[in-house]
Amino acid sequence: MELGFIVKNLKLMVRSGSENLTVDVNGGYVGDLLSDVIANSKQGDIWITRQIHQNIVAVATLKDLAGIILVDNNEPARETLEKAIREMVPVMVSELPCFETAGRIYQLIAAREK
Amino acid sequence: MKLSEVQQILDAEVVVGQDQMQKDVYTAFGADLMSDVLAFARPGTMLLTGLTNPQVIRTSEILDIAAIIIVRGKVPPPETIKLAEELNIPILRTRYILFETAGRLYRWGIVGCVDKVDAGKKRG
Amino acid sequence: MPGKSADKKPSFSDTFSVVGGNFDDAGRVSSRIKGILKKMCLPFEVIRKAAICTFEAEMNIVCYAQRGDITLSVDEDRIVIEVVDQGEGIPDIDLAMQAGYSTSTAKIREMGFGAGMGLMNIDRYADDFDITSEVGKGTKLVMIVNITEGS
């Protein structure tokens, strides 16, 4: 499923990487501890987190994640945004909490697989 | 939804609180940052987290969390279990990742425990 | 509440000490204080606000100071929680109050703390919050939660 479909469906606010919204999302990963996300997320996952510091961009690049969704209306820190724009990593903001954001994306992916 | 149903949906093991499986739950909050939980989680919600240290139990007690769902099959250390038993807070352990856990519960009608968060509230 | 507010003697006051670096025990004082407030039959939201502030402050002592004291005072219309620690102190309080700013270690972060949200949480939940610090000596927090019905 295209990332852009999720963006539209959840009314996410795209803060960077809008040139990469056609990327394919294979699954999702929720986590606020970078070591956990590095260890356990999979390529093509959309990453849902409330961490806003610039290391998240490095993790997304390292693990070839489809993009990063910041929950609870959290905006990326300035350095995070600059880095994400430079590296064309999609960073998006969801007004929903983590649980609801994950739940809805899970539903979308499940519906597509049928 | 009863905690016993949550246990089934998540194929979970009851680590603490077998006697509380009839408790009703309607909402969930997912996070690995305890300060995030402290800022936004409402009383009576389930906490979904990958953390297993005793501070998770303390945080849950302070906030009157209904139950803790530990994800990714992580095994809580004995001091965490002991504290949860002492404070009578149920712990369930599932092998699913947090994304899958949230997705399954959402599908069965559990909702987020905050409607919308104003992250900027009172922040400089 | 009206009438007798001339003498502001707290109806309850007690001090609890917290040991820095003792993570297994961190939060015990906050649990105890929550229990005391519950026994006083204060409104649920008042207890909740006071408990959250105390817990964040207690975690700060455990994470960053050698030791500290938490004093709980309750009178008719407010809860005052005073936290005094012996630690390194905070050189720039404005910076420390900023979202996401933290000097925490990897160990603290792995426990789900140290994300630069603690002081903000206190500011969010306390009705009145004051912080003073002296580098090399320690930090003092005064957190006040008003006791109002239906809050």
Image: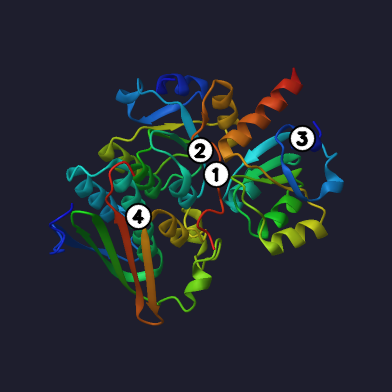
Q: Where is residue A75 shown, x and y percent of the image?
A: 65, 53
Circles 2 and 3 in contact, beta carbons < 8 Å? no
Query: Are tags 2 and 3 found on a single chain?
Result: no
Residue lying at the far top of the rendered structure? A114
Subunit of mark 4? C
CA gap, disc 3 to disc 1? 20 Å
Q: Residue at x 44, y 55 (%)?
A: C124
Foreground disc of the pair 4, 1: 1
Q: Along the line of sight, which residue is nearer the eye, B24 or A44?
A: B24
Residue B117 disc label: 1
CA gap, disc 2 to disc 1? 7 Å
Q: Which residue is mark 4?
A: C55
Q: Amino acid at mark 2?
A: Val
Q: Residue at x 36, y 51 (%)?
A: C52
Q: Where is residue A27 shown, x and y percent of the image?
A: 71, 34
Subunit of mark 3? A
Q: Residue at x 27, y 42 (%)?
A: C43
Instruction: Label 3: state its secondary structure.
Output: helix
> Dot 3: few (<14), some (14–19), or many (≥20) neighbours within 10 Å?
few
Residue A19 shown left or right of residue C9 in the figure:
right
Q: Amino acid at mark 4?
A: Phe
Instruction: Label 2: state its secondary structure.
Output: loop
Residue B73's place in the image compared with C50, above or below, is above
Q: Which residue is mark 2?
A: B114
Residue B5's place in the image compared with C12, above or below, is above
Q: Which residue is mark 3?
A: A8
Residue A11 shown left or right of residue B24 in the figure:
right
Q: Amino acid at mark 1?
A: Val
CA gap, disc 4 to disc 1? 22 Å
Q: Where is residue A13 shown, x and y percent of the image?
A: 73, 45
Residue A110 disc label: none
